[in-house]
Image: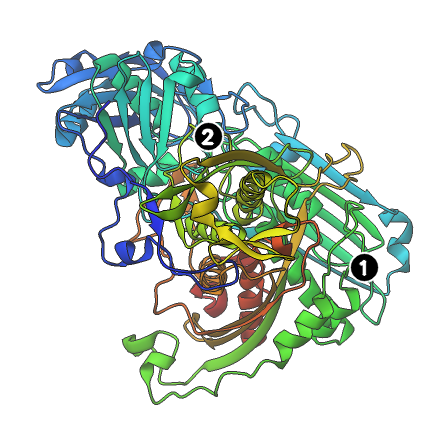
Amino acid sequence: MTIPLRAPDRIAAPGKGGVGESTLRPDGTLKVRGEFAYSSDLWLDGMLWGATLRSPHPRARIVSLDIAPALAHPGVHAVLTHEDVPGRKHFGVDLTWDQPVLAIGEVRHQGEAIALVAADHPETARRALEKIAIEWEILEPLTDAWRAAFDPDYPQVQTLPNPVRHQPVRVGDVDAVRDRAEVVVSGTFEVGIQDQAFLGPESGLAVPGEDGGLDLYVATQWMHNDLDQIGPCLGLEDDRIRMTLSGVGGAFGGREDLSMQIHAGMLALRTGKPVKMVYNRYESFFGHVHRHPARMRYEYGASRDGRLLYADVEIVLDGGAYTSSTRNVVGNAASLGVGPYEIPNVKIDAYGVYTNNPPCGAMRGFGAVQACFAYESMMDRLAAACGLDPVTVRQVNAASQGSLLATGQVVHAPLPMAEMLQQARDLPMPPALDDSDLRNLPGGASQTTHGEGVRRGVGYGVGLKNICFSEGFDDYSTARVRLEVIGGVATALVHTSAAEVGQGLVTIEAQIARTELGIERVVIHPADNQVGNAGSSSASRQSYMTGGAVQAACFAVRDELFSRYGAKYRDLSLVGGKVVSEEHGVIATIEEALGTEAVDETREYHHLPTTGMHPETGQGSTHTQVALCVHRAVVDVDVELGLVKVVELAAVQDVGKILNRLSLEGQIHGGTAQGLGLAVMEEIVVSDGKVRNPSFTDYLIPTILDMPPMRLEILENADPHAPYGLRGAGEPPTLSSTPAIVAAIRDATGLALDRVPVRPEHISGR
């Protein structure tokens, strides 16, 4: 087996640094200097280039398909269609098996894969695609998600019926108490399609093995789930597919679903040659799922002093043509549909539906983002109707430790929401607008204003996010730790299949090993499928789950090492490179204790079990853990032109235990930036099922000029059930930042603003 040039090697974690220290990331310097090897950098001599023909139509029948002209093109080695799929012809991230590997007779969304080409040059492959002749019968796309949810006469998009899932939540009796409400507020809210906008496009390298199997070097979030789909589609047993994680240029949920993995494997097996595939940015917009757009109807009833009496909620999430993660996104939206508030009577109906719009699946926040924008907007409306300030009305209704969520689940860990809101309010405000410098103004140096028409606003947002997988899923992670003497120095090798997608997991793995084994030298093995399942790098779960697995494996290594001393010593520990007895002091160095015999242990880590949601009431202990973030946003708005400048974002977040403050702050900043993007600029614009802005020229994401300074208050209220007491931290700030920013714009303009992203025309009316 020839190893591809620049495939990721073992990552040696630098220097000292255990749990709690801001250890630098081993990949950080390489990335900022442009020297890190991403999956798109993989190379093998003699490799071919793969390319994909995609549908220009959101809904159409394929009347005829002629690949002969493409096969005849010089330099082309293979052209494949659905007839060439060697195994199952469908796949699906949740093993629903409803998405075709290549279109079979019809297409259900723009960009659906139809045919594959392998050629000796990427331009040759692209030109061959243009020679594939297709006769179409174009059909009217089905794009109305609301009708798909509620109209029984609305046509079906695919063989699986609408809705994908309907999840009710019922607490008390909303209809019985509706007339008792002294204040009633309502609203209909919409969230547009947000893209993960990762910078590294989908890419990878498939290499046929001498045993008839396949070596895959890919950028993914969940290697073993990929394997569960790739093997059946390629007609290969799992042990004949060897997967290695290549450098991942961001993910945010968009790499949970397969992209080029099966396609590259098909081409490599057909040609007998290595095949590389790299999407360009345009294709990337069609090559992965996006955040579900949502339409949500809310009605709240409360007493005059702002205490909530009931919530009546309908949420419709548009999943596009195939199932992907829609079922679980609906579960999250339903279970977290009214957020971290105590409401005695709740009626929630959450739906996910199929349409011919772009496929949607996992994205940071996973159903909770959409609901959070709606319920936080409702809290602001309630505050206004009751004559209360927005912080007070949230404190009056705030959940805390021991509270019941809408699903009946007890909050078992500290949840100091009222105190966090007070902390956010008490943080110093940014200085008043200085309009002498145009860069401080909305519109910046474009000189759209010199201060006239600019108003300042302040808003708050609170987000509650579940951590780890939910609803009874057997969520676990596996880690192998080997301790041995290399070059006279005790060295730990940490081996997992967990995907480092930019979140800093390899740094945390090394910090845990140093802490538990009392050594400095730790090496992180490349992630691959030669070790057990580590689960997905999503749901803010890897520090919790793979961190827990690494800790458990370290405990096992430590116990095995101590067993060499029999019952001679008790209360042994590993400290500073030495085996230490509480009674006798230093017994030996770790190198002496190991000698020439390594200790190698593999362990699984499972969190506390969860339950499913009752199909009629939604009740159940569905979540492993919940985490909370509070944002305060300060904005300046040019009310005449509708331009917004976010002046400052302050966040108060409870993380249970800080494992690495530097990395943690980066997660809070990054999550906040994605929330800012959803609030004021990020949206895939779709018309009649077609994407109108598939580029970073027209799909705008925040830059360093858009992201303001941040004030952070990080709390450490430990969760007794989690490793080190930690709470997942990557997703909560994505929830709360969006409604906080929109609330601040409302405060500046007096407008209702019930849709995100907020566009200039929503403010100026032009």
From the viewer's side, name the closer residue of 635 and 182: 635
Q: Which residue is denoted by mark 1 in the rendering?
A: 301
Horizontal and vertical percent position of residue 404: 80, 52
Residue in the image at 68% along x and 55% along y: 719
Amino acid at circle 2:
Val
- State the SS at label 1: strand
- Residue drawn at x 91%, y 49% is 176
Position of 62 with respect to 30 (left or right) is right
Q: Is residue 194 visible to us here?
A: no
Which quadrant does the C terminus fall into?
A: bottom left
Closest to the observer, 326 or 299: 326
Residue wearing tag 2: 531
Left or right of residue 484: residue 324 = right
Q: Is 2 above or below relative to 637? A: above
Q: Is residue 321 above or below residue 573?
A: above
Q: In terms of image quadrants, where is residue 107? A: top left
Q: In the image, is 386 to the left or to the right of 731?
A: right
The three-letter amino acid code for the residue at tag 1 is Gly
Which of the pair 86/10 is nearer the observer?
10
